[in-house]
Amino acid sequence: MERAIQADAKVYSEAGTESSPRGSGCSLRHFACEQNLLSRPDGSASFLQGDTSVLAGVYGPAEVKVSKEIFNKATLEVILRPKIGLPGVAEKSRERLIRNTCEAVVLGALHPRTSITVVLQVVSDAGSLLACCLNAACMALVDAGVPMRALFCGVTCALDSDGTLVLDPTAKQEKEARAVLTFALDSVEQKLLMSTTKGLYSDAELQQCLAAAQAASQHVFRFYRESLQRRYSKS
Amino acid sequence: MKETPLSNCERRFLLRAIEEKKRLDGRQTYDYRSIRVSFGTDYGCCVVELGKTRVLGQVSCELVSPKLNRATEGILFFNLELSQMAAPAFEPGRQSDLLVKLNRLLERCLRNSKCIDTESLCVVAGEKVWQIRVDLHLLNHDGNIIDAASIAAIVALCHFRRPDVSVQGDEVTLYAPEERDPVPLSIHHMPICVSFAFFQQGMYLLVDPNEREERVMDGLLVIAMNKHREICTIQSSGGIMLLKDQVLRCSKIAGVKVAEITELIQKALENDQKVRKEGGKFGFAESIANQRITAFKMEKAPVDTSDVEEKAEEIMAEAEPPPEVIAEPVLWTPGTAQIGEGVENTWGVLEDSEKEGEDEGGSDEAVLPDDVKMDTAEVSNVGSQDAPIVLSDSEEEEMIILEPDKNPKKIRTQIVSAKQEKAPSKKPARKRKKKRIVN
Amino acid sequence: MVVRFKTVEPMEYYRRFLKENCHTNGREFGKFRTTTVNIVPISTTDGSALVKLGNTTVVYGVKAEFAKPPTDTQVANQFIANVTENSQIIQKEDFCVSSGKLPWFLYCDLICLDYDGNILDACTFALSVALKNVKTALAEVNLKKKGYLNIRTHPVVTFIAMFDGTLLIVDCTGEEEHLAIGNLTIIMDEEGKLCCFHKPGGSGLTGAKFQDSMNHAVTRHKEVKQIMEEVINSMKPKKKVTFSKQI
């Protein structure tokens, strides 16, 4: 198994540097994930999509500040830390998007008067950062054993000036794109949990992007499942 | 979240073990935990792991105007962040004593020891210099933050490449990495901090204390040194009295440790450079150990998007088309227009509803929510019949103020007409009230 | 009784109405609240507008200033909105608009006088109207200077709240917004192109559902466009008179 992966890695050796073109747009970059790599948080995960990398740590269910306590469910907090400098408005709005997405799937009612804190640290940004943050948050929540009604994943689509669809774009592709759309989808029915967009596009294009994101989400969920299978395998 | 307190028996157990020259992780007194350095794809990005303590370092640069009293020197800025990820007790955005102490120590270790040639960072004297910013994020706290942070800082600085610049006359040209190779910083030496923890009033000493040991220690001595055995900074904290011999012995140990660590750093840097030159794979994806069962990788996955257009069309075809007929807007006066039915506004009717509450009080209790529904439906019907007329009084008054250019007479007539028409519309509402009482 | 029921079980109270496909005040789901627009001559600004959407009221002032020409003149209609939501009744939001053919900066100040849901809709509407207004004012005042405000697109915001996973409600009040389990903001321009499809979390949504919501947005755009044209046309002759008096 191990050998096979490494042998494959050589074939795709260009994927590491990302300087070379990725061929057709409709593919996901190589994914990697490591869970439980930090000792202090209750759950942690490092998620890599190509060269984009995010580290997530989850504390919870744990003690909550009285001012933030909610009597019938857990208080969910998301903190996103940029790599350079202090967090700004962009981080705050992303935090809110991720928080609301998590809140839709986490069964907070099972742990009333507690806090669940997700801390995300951007390790490197090479495109599709928000999607990677979402994936890292989901894997860390799974690692922490927080009860959830479904898993979720983030997928970013970019539309070129000629309308070509690119999945999981790199930073360069995002920059050149006419529109960049990020979706969060759940694993049960591929329903849309969160969406945020930039640029101009038609409603037909939006539907296409969503359908493509739903197709891509199947791969991401399969990746989740296989990595968990490996983790809980006996051998 | 508060820090979990250390129980007395735990404390006693740890101290007893130290007295017996034993450490919980099986190390000897002078042993360091294993150090691992990995680099990101960007220049100046590294993660240093010291046992389970983990620090992410990132160097960035910017062209700024220099400080007034140092016109020919670049600026070096350090920022260590204690993320909540590292330990639950760290609060985001708070300058704790520990954080201030660590940042100050880092500055003394790296900036004041002049390990970086700041004069080489000057582009145009008195006008443009490079500001080098070192961001350090603590990702996991398992003791000895300062050693890990100082290693991460110096590794990131060594790894960093700044864009090349050229000056022609007054013009400063900045070259992209594709045009000209970025240049490394000129580093004179590599100071590294080594921490010594003292227990039982200095009786026992441990190198590289972990988090548990830090919590039972009496005092801490930090020595920053380079591989030439030059001491860059030395700090003793915790209020412990140390003998001259003890300090000398510590500095000797520090010399040995620094030599080892420097060698490791240089090896890691060389290795990364070699891989980059040869065009191999680098970045954090490579530093994930394949053998761990907690780690998993997936190669580039093609996604079948051939049926995307069909799916989109299908959904769009199925959806109800938007209604063709839409409400006509009503023009009140030049500059004021309205669309939709006028049932919504509760600004003017606020007083009425209060009165209603006072008058009816008890009888209101008998009304079931279902009845209310009926009532509200009625209201909406009433509203829509004479929709454009229902404008609250307050709004009309506002209009008078906001239209100073108008002939005042005109407006007055307008209001009168509006009120006249409004009067009948109020009547049904009153009737309704009575009805309810009857109910 | 009713008031108490509403206080104790707000969600249950709303559900009763939702079953009947209407708001608590009898408005149908697909219908928007009364939208009133008034071009207010606030003398210190170059263009201003007051928009009322039910109780939600927003006053908008645009101030044009001659500043350094922006280096980046390619931006067609960059539109940075920092929405800081307060539960307070007074809200201030700053929009910064820089248009490609515009040699000055526009400072747009927005004050919300009453918050009762659907704030973004009211804000962008007020912004569009106020900017339209600026066009007429500046074009006449500054004939010597060659400035002309060219507004290419008129984005219209449609805010849709979700209840119980399946119900979509347009233009909800503040109370409903608070109780909703999810919301959706669609911003559409004149050609039916979307510039924003923002769903900040909340419960899931299928493709078919959001196509429905898109159609709501189309309807809304038509309405807003109509009312805007009406109001602008009505103002044009008036303005000339007032300006000639001042000059």
Image (tube, coloured by chain):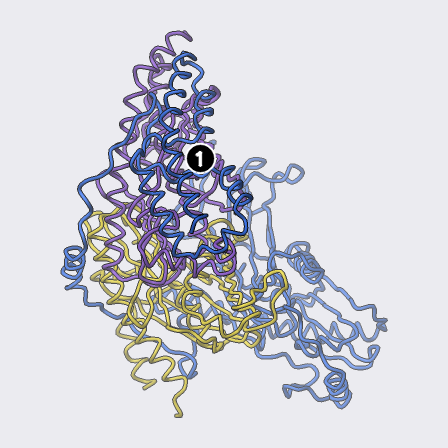
Chain colours: A yellow, B blue, C purple
SS at mark 1 in the image: strand
Between residue C81 and residue A31, name the one nearer to us.
C81
- Residue C4: x and y in percent read 52, 56
| Horizontal and vertical percent position of residue A229 | 36, 84
Counting every numbered tag in the picture gives: 1
Tell me which amino acid carries mark 1.
Val
**Is residue A144 found left or right of C204 in the rendered image?**
right
Nearer to me, B149 or A54? A54
Q: Which of C86 and B357 lies nearest the eye of the viewer?
A: B357
Mark 1 lies on residue: C58
Which quadrant is home to the C terminus of chain C?
top left
Task: Place residue C67 in its image quadrant.
Answer: top left
Query: Is residue B420 in view?
Result: yes
Residue drawn at point x = 26 percent, y = 74 percent: A11
Q: Is residue B35 left or right of residue B3?
A: left
Furthest toward the bottom, the residue is A235
Identify the residue at image location x=39%, y=29%: B423
User: Does B325 appear above or below A62?
Assistant: above
Q: Nearer the viewer, residue B222 or A50?
A: A50
At which x and y percent is residue B420? 38, 24
**From the viewer's perspective, is C73 left or right of B153?**
left
- Say above or below: B398 vs A203: above
Residue A213: percent from the left, percent from the top? 27, 63
Decide if residue B106 is on the left or right side of residue B285.
right
Residue B227 showing in the rendered view: no
C144 versus B217 height, above or below = above
Check the residue under mark 1 and report the chain it is in.
C
Residue lying furthest front: B438
Badge 1 density bin: few <14, some 14–19, many ≥20, Cα 10 Å: many
Residue B374 sits above or below residue A36 on the image: above
